[in-house]
Image: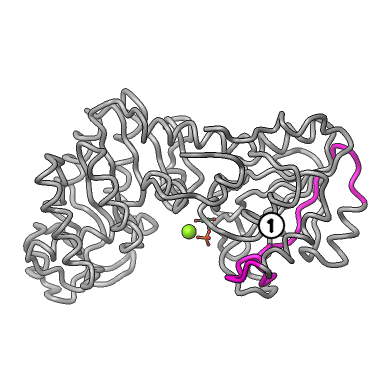
Amino acid sequence: MSLRTLESLGSLAGTRIVVRCDLNVPLQDGVITDDGRVRASLPTLKTLLDAGARVVVVSHLGRPEGAPDARYSLAPVAKRLSELLGSDVSFASDTVGADAQKVVGALGDGQVAVLENLRFNPGETSKDEADRTAFAEKLASFGDAFVSDGFGVVHRKQASVYELPKLLPSAAGLLISTELEVLDRLTESPERPYTVVLGGSKVSDKLGVIGHLLPRVNTLLIGGGMLFTFLAAQGHKVGSSLLEEDQLDTVRGYLAEAEKLGVDIVLPTDVVVAAAFSADAEHVVQPADAIEKTPFGASGLGLDIGPDTSARFADIIRSSKTVFWNGPMGVFELAPFAAGTQAVAQALTDVDGLSVVGGGDSAAAVRALGFDDDQFGHISTGGGASLEFLEGKRLPGLEILGWQQ
Ligand code: 3PG
Ligand code: MG
């Protein structure tokens, strides 16, 4: 890996540095529910500020559609950043407009500003390279150099990730370097046994990863929404649980390939089935091959892995030397369906080796369940980005910084 690093930018005192962070944090009614990504941005920002740079932070938040949308304002994030840095952070109410120009122009050495959500401008995510470049040029006018540190978006070919680094002297920040060191260990030389735990509700996203991981791992544990597509692929009825019918053949293919490769794909043997999707819904633990045989019949919803499965997953995780986990095992936000995720997280903290939690959702889950970041080997800030890295996909936001897989 030959990533350009901060040192390559030379002396930073008095220079304006545009920094792309991924400050895409979960918000509930304007309140940040997990500030992990803000905290993860601190080492780079502090390094630049201590060196006397004038720092202009840019980020996206959520998926607004190319126009201002108050629900996705970065204002609460700028406030949190100010608390964490223990210093003032100015905030521009637009991205490249009059306010941004004023705020950037007023920055002194060692001061920091956050600009409003990049995705309020259609140029950020445009499919048209010329549109992206035009937007990147405006961002570039705010800096003498560019630092890319939003690991969570390096898989996106977007203006602030891919076009902007072509327009200014550019380097990767400390978060990107740290993430790459850990993910490299997972792909290049994992100590064995190597177990990957996959869950979460974005079923088809994750299904794509499995094919790429199979030849690399010893064991794959499947929980979360996607487990029902696996059970259905084996001929079981899954009631009203999440199911991607169009993926059944793909899943059957994976099961057959795993057998050929000698990789264990471990599926739940019991699940928690609920009458409805709510915290006070009636629910029972049920064998995974009899999901419709509860009082709720075909309308029952599987919302978590069951206790036998949790215990089995935990045993496998604890006896592994390398574990990567992406995606909650159940609907952990609702207390009755959090036990599977809790058990998996707990087991990861006991791993004698490298344990990595990947993904916005899983990172938020472990913090919501009361775990500390330092109980794990590494908590990645990248969901899609870390999965695509492990898939061996080309990541435009890294390649443009000189990195080669
Ligand atoms: C994420 O949360 O996965 C990153 O911030 C990227 O966001 P996106 O999936 O909306 O591009
Ligand atoms: Mg995403």
Asked whether residue 116 is drawn in magenta, I would say yes
Image location of residue 246, percent across then percent down: 23, 72
- Dot 1: few (<14), some (14–19), or many (≥20) neighbours within 10 Å? some
Q: Amino acid at mark 1?
A: Pro
Image location of residue 72, percent across then percent down: 63, 66
Rendered residue at 76%/63% (across/down): 95
Q: Is residue 338 left or right of residue 2?
A: left
- Above/below status of 357 relative to 78: above
Location of mark 1 (residue): 76
Q: Is residue 176 left or right of residue 302?
A: right
Q: Is residue 16 left or right of residue 314?
A: right
Q: Nearer the viewer, residue 14 or 358?
A: 14
Asked whether residue 23 is drawn in magenta, I would say no
| Dominant SS type (magenta) | loop
- Above/below status of 261 relative to 157: above
Image location of residue 163, percent across then percent down: 66, 56
Q: Nearer the viewer, residue 126 or 220?
A: 126
Rendered residue at 59%/37% (across/down): 175
Image location of residue 352, percent across then percent down: 31, 23
SS class of the residue under badge 1?
A: helix
Q: Which residues are magenta?
A: 106-129
Q: Nearer the viewer, residue 233 or 135?
A: 135
Image quadrant assignment for residue 287 = bottom left
Q: Is residue 227 left or right of residue 96?
A: left
Q: Nearer the viewer, residue 310 or 218?
A: 218
Image quadrant assignment for residue 42 = top right
Rendered residue at 68%/36% (across/down): 44
Rendered residue at 28%/26% (across/down): 321
Number of numbered discs present?
1
